């Protein structure tokens, strides 16, 4: 039976006399931060917080996931779709350790989440008590900040600091570990939002000399090229980016996480970068005379062999995180700044310009890619359904307007290549960590964070089975997620590499799958399967038109490869369009 | 070429910050030859940690901002050789 995410209780305790318990301080602090949605899973060491939550049923939605990993991925999806901080409650021990993958994912992909973990009572710390684990030390490498609280008095300030840290600067995950005695004991409560931290300077002062130097490079460039990353979305620099590109006539490509920061239907948009990105975007990286990298970190999947990356070009790097500047690629001009602030400062200094020949060189590569790859992917004459035609049709049917959440693997790359994103913040994926199992729970969170948008989770059969228990959450709370599983009965990307680089030795990549349709129906979610090309269009229409959660499995070609491809360790210039038999 | 560097970090004295620093060095396989950490004698809420690190100049250049971006870290000092490390040690209060 469908259940709401709220309990039938009314908040009648906000004005009760202080002192209050630490558990109640947690709830009131979250309300002070305007939190409305929490993803979590209760257990022994977090029970006082859940008991306090019970009394705030009309103020806070709690989504009971089926696994703590599901809770944090849902919080990530919520944060990325809404621009707000995602919040997670879990218990100590295994509850806390089950967060680790999500924390690492949020850390590398700059996603603001605050995780509150219960902990054993403070006198039991370090004693190997039941469900005690050293979550602080386990999570230090995968959190932007973490704190253990052992006194109820410290809870409001810890939460205030956590929210401030999570959402400012380069966003990231924060963990607050609260001992059970701190949850149960009482203390006076007052909440003061954090306005700053002495040792933390999230917004650097813009260096106008660097901006002027960048403008000079842009004004004298014949073949300038903008690479736009997630920093554009995080700083809200989409409009400034578009204006800069249009004023100076500069082609724009997106990194994986930067997708949707520049409309795919814009004449200056040239495509997606990286190992399985577009041909033109990668090839022209080594043809341009100026690279303007905005809010991106020159990930190895973007650069290929970094020693052969854009050696001919001057590089301007606009980046908020100082540790990313000159880390992988040397910048001729580094602008350590918020992307929006930097682009807006740059805009009046840049002269109007056009680069038609340079833009034409992208079009030539695009034509070659279309003839050799896209046309065959989108309009295959025979054989089983191909991933490319599914995503192309989905993009056409939704006009690039849906909020797309992908998992990791071939379907992720195909979606990044063929879904034409037209609105900002409509692409959510696990980029840096490459976490299979991310999409289903993240899509739940995205649907709750952006309730007015259609949310489609696109997943492979391998990743789907990593977190499919969250179908229970989707069914219970009737979360309107459309789940599209592209089933090739393989771990497709690994199989592709085995074929190309390990002489087709398919070592443990073939999967014997259950009947997904029956499985999903068992959760009470309407489910259908498509195996024939003739039925694909109507199945997609029905899938998209019906309200509420829906599942569609598309049986796709088993041994399809995603091209073009920059082979591991090769230069972006060595991108291959196909492998000759 | 690898060589010795003195690396001194001034930070809030909170649980876990030393672990964060050590993790950053371990992750990049930077050898810690000597480590001295100390609470500020006038303000126990702040402190400092000094390291002699054996690594390359490029690695030092890359790891420094990674340490500086930790929330509790106020600033760092890096210099070639061990002189700065031993000068730091000499400034520490000696318990009588």
Image (cartoon, rainbow, N blue to C red):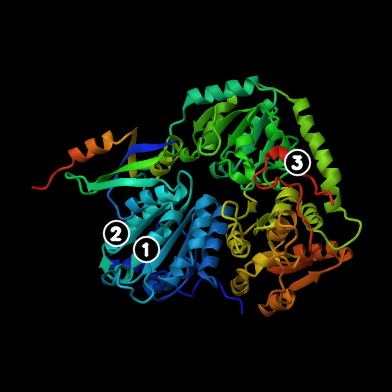
The disc, 3 or 1, on the residue closer to the chain's N-terminal end is 1
Q: Nearer the viewer, mark 3 or mark 1?
A: 3
| Residue with the mark numbered 1 | A177
* Foreground pick, A249 / A464: A464
Q: Quadrant of the N terminus of chain A?
A: bottom right
User: The residue marked by circle 1 belongs to what chain?
Assistant: A
Mark 2 or 3, nearer chain start: 2
**Residue drawn at (80%, 39%) of the image:** A366
Please give left or right for residue A280 compared with residue B67 in the image.
Answer: right
Q: Position of residue A569 (x, y in %)?
A: 64, 45
Instruction: Tell me the element at label 3.
Output: helix
Mark toward the start of the polypeptide (1 vs 2):
2
Residue B26 appears at what percent x and percent y?
41, 50
**Secondary structure under the numbered disc 1 in the rendered image:** strand
The residue that mark 3 highlights is A279
Residue A463 in which image quadrant: bottom right
Res A154 label = 2
Q: Residues within 10 Å of mark 2 (few under 14, many from 20)?
A: some
For the point 28% across and 69% down, which residue is it?
A122
Chain under callout 2? A
Element assignment for label 2: helix
């Amino acid at each position: 039976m469908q259940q709401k995410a709220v309990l039938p209780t009314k908040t009648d305790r906000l004005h009760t006399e202080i002192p209050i318990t630490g558990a109640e301080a947690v709830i009131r602090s979250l309300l002070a931060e305007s939190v409305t949605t929490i993803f979590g899973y209760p257990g022994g060491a977090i029970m006082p917080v859940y008991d306090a939550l019970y009394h705030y049923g009309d103020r806070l939605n709690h989504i009971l996931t089926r696994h703590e990993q599901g809770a944090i991925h849902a919080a990530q999806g919520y944060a990325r779709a809404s621009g707000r901080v995602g919040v997670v409650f879990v218990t100590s021990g295994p509850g806390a350790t089950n967060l680790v993958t999500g924390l690492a994912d949020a850390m590398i992909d700059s996603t603001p989440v605050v995780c509150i973990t219960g902990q054993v009572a403070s006198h039991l710390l370090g004693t190997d008590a039941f469900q005690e684990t050293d979550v602080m030390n386990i999570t230090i490498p995968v959190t932007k900040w973490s704190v253990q609280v052992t006194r109820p008095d410290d809870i409001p300030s810890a939460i205030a600091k956590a929210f401030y840290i999570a959402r400012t600067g380069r966003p990231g995950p924060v963990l607050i570990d609260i001992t059970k005695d701190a949850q149960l004991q009482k203390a006076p409560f007052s909440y003061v939002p954090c306005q700053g931290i002495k040792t933390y300077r999230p917004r650097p002062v813009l260096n106008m000399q660097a901006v002027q130097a960048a403008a000079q490079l842009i004004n004298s460039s014949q073949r300038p090229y903008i690479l736009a990353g997630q920093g554009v979305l995080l700083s809200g620099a989409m409009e400034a980016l578009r204006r800069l590109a249009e004023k100076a006539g500069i082609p724009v490509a997106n990194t994986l996480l930067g997708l949707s920061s520049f409309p795919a239907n814009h004449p200056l948009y040239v495509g997606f970068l990286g190992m399985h990105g577009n041909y033109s975007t990668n090839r022209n990286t080594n043809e341009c005379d100026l690279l303007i990298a905005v809010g991106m970190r020159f990930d190895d999947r973007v650069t290929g062999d970094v020693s052969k990356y854009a050696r001919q070009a001057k590089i301007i790097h606009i980046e908020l995180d100082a540790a990313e500047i000159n880390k992988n690629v040397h910048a001729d001009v580094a602008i350590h700044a918020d992307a929006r602030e930097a682009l807006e400062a740059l805009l009046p200094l840049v002269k109007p310009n056009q680069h038609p020949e340079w833009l034409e060189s992208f079009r030539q590569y695009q034509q070659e890619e279309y003839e050799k790859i896209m046309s065959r992917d989108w309009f295959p004459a025979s054989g089983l359904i191909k991933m490319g035609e599914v995503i192309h049709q989905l993009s056409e049917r939704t006009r690039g307007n849906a909020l797309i959440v992908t998992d990791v693997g071939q379907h992720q790359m195909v979606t990044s290549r063929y879904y034409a994103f037209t609105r900002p913040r409509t692409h959510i994926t696990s980029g840096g960590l490459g976490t299979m199992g991310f999409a289903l729970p993240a899509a739940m969170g995205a649907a709750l964070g952006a309730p007015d948008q259609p949310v489609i989770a696109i997943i492979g059969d391998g990743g789907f089975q990593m977190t499919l228990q969250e179908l229970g959450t989707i069914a219970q709370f009737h979360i309107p997620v459309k789940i599209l599983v592209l089933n090739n009965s393989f771990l497709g990307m690994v199989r592709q590499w085995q074929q190309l680089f390990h002489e087709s030795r398919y070592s443990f990549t073939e999967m014997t799958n259950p009947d997904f349709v029956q499985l999903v129906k068992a959760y009470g979610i309407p489910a259908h399967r498509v195996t024939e090309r003739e039925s694909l269009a109507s199945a997609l229409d029905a899938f998209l038109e019906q309200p509420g959660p829906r599942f569609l499995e598309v049986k796709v070609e088993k041994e399809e490869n995603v091209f073009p491809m920059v082979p591991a360790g090769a230069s972006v210039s060595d991108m291959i369009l196909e492998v000759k038999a | 070429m690898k060589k010795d560097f003195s690396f001194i970090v001034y930070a809030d004295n909170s649980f876990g910050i030393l672990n964060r620093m050590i993790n950053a060095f371990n992750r990049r396989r930077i050898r810690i030859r000597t480590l001295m950490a100390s609470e500020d004698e006038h303000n126990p809420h702040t402190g400092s940690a000094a390291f002699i690190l054996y690594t390359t100049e490029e690695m030092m250049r890359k790891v420094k901002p990674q340490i500086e971006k930790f929330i509790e870290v106020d600033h760092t000092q890096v210099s070639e050789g061990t002189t700065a490390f031993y000068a730091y040690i000499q400034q520490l209060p000696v318990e009588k």
